[in-house]
Amino acid sequence: MVPRLTTALTGPLLALEAKFLDSAPAIERWLRGKWQEHTPPFYGSVDLRNSGVKLAPVDMNLFPGGFNNLNSAFLPLCVQAAMSAIDKICPNAKSLLLIPENHTRNTFYLQNVAQLVKILQLTGLDVRLGTLIPEIDRPTEVDLPNGAKLVLEPLVRTKYRLGLNGFDPCAILLNNDLSAGIPEILQNLNEQFVLPPLHAGWAVRRKSNHFTAYDEVADEFAKLVGIDPWQINPYFSVCSSVNFHERQGEECLASNVDAVLTLIREKYKEYGIEETPYVVVKADAGTYGMGVMTVKSAAEVIGLNRKQRNKMSVIKEGLEVSQVIIQEGVHTHERVSDGVAEPVVYMIDRYVVGGFYRVHSGRGADENLNAPGMHFEPLAFETSCCLPDQCQNPDAAPNRFYAYGVVARLAQLAASLELENTAPPED
């Protein structure tokens, strides 16, 4: 099923989907050429927002944690894409070490780990789990709700290699976003591939670098298919040297909020959009929907109360926020049942391997849905994101999902440029 849109699908989005449909051969050729020039991240997930006028990515995760939410029908796609990714990196790979987050009590996350293990094992790899949790000093079983078990093992480091007791893997796959920093045990592994690279972790990575790369990708793509790049790209700006506890950087925040809102108002006027423009102020590093606030005027970021400052000042692992991105807010007019929804598209290598809807019945169309009370609809994507159907309307399921897949792959391409641009110099 395709979630219903609260806006009539006779406007710009329908035209946008029609453009993608008409340009599908050119789009696929262009993307194929780009992947000959750039290496995609091993995997990624993209949060999209569909306003009925624009369809744009608002976040890109290089350590996706929701493979358990994908429709099981897409397991073969996941396996084939993982095979492709591994063959390019280590064609003779026999073993892989997977390092997950330290969420041993989060059963939803652990089910994601179990699904990742299953995908990788089906490629023919021997997969074992190493943990960064210092308290785990022997193989430790973790029970899952479905009766399955995971075994977490302590890492064993030699001079240039990382493995487990009696296990020397060809490659290391991180499903840990390194928010707390890059542990010494992961550094200087000169004889093994670490995927994604260490500088993809939030200890180093910045969302503003990603969206700077996305600007470049979106502009080139828009020229290819003949659209306004704004329809697939949110405006943004950055404030550094912010300290919410000390009220430092409020003037920078206010001026940047005002500047981005001014740009949005001009576009809303151009497209006849009557909704109230808004921006999302969020930590430039980090995930889990922490350090995020919705703002509709510059005055709202001056004189934040203590509760607001506390909410914005700390993200995952207790890290303090010192830099924020001010991003154009994209209203989501998609709904699943009684909840506001946004699509999340998953990729392995350069391939779309499925997706789901993040749904929140307690949030509005202009709010962050990655918040307590959300749930996922894993059965929403009943058709592939890769197979448009010229015989159906532009908003039919295969074509709506194809549009999602195109924009998600643009974000994946931007991520590859971002990682190239921010790679540390080789010694």
Image (cartoon, rainbow, N blue to C red):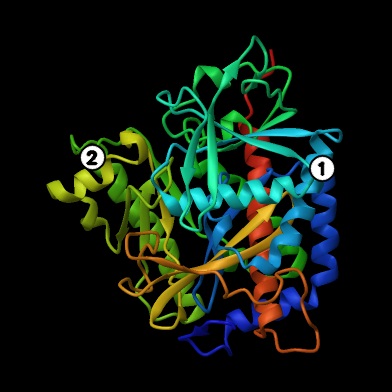
The secondary element bearing badge 2 is classed as loop
Residue 246: assigned label: none
Q: Quadrant of residue 323?
A: top left
Q: Read off the residue under disc 1.
A: 37
In percent of width and height, residue 278 lies at: 36, 65
- Above or below for 124 versus 71: above
In percent of width and height, residue 143 lies at: 47, 47
Q: Tell me the crowding category of disc 1: few under 14, some 14 to 19, or many 20 or more residues within 10 angstroms, Cα based.
A: few
Q: Is residue 64 visible?
A: no
Q: Read off the residue under disc 2.
A: 244
The secondary element bearing badge 1 is classed as helix
Three-letter amino acid code at the position of disc 1:
Glu
Q: Earlier in the sequence, mark 1 or mark 2?
A: 1
Q: Nearer the viewer, residue 254 or 390?
A: 390
- Above or below for 83 versus 232: above
Q: Nearer the viewer, residue 155 or 175?
A: 155
**Direction from residue 344 to residue 121 in the image, left or right:** right
Residue at image position (60%, 65%) is 355
Three-letter amino acid code at the position of disc 2:
Phe
**Direction from residue 212 to residue 370 in the image, left or right:** left
**Direction from residue 43 to residue 350 in the image, left or right:** right
Residue at image position (67%, 55%) is 347
In percent of width and height, residue 22 lies at: 79, 78
In percent of width and height, residue 327 lies at: 43, 55
Q: Nearer the viewer, residue 361 or 78?
A: 78
**Direction from residue 351 to residue 145 in the image, left or right:** left
Q: Tell me the crowding category of disc 2: few under 14, some 14 to 19, or many 20 or more residues within 10 angstroms, Cα based.
A: many
- Above or below for 349 versus 398: above
In the displayed image of the protein, which residue is found farthest to the top?
Answer: 159
In the displayed image of the protein, which residue is found farthest to the front?
Answer: 147
Q: Is residue 39 visible?
A: yes
Residue at image position (49%, 75%) is 51
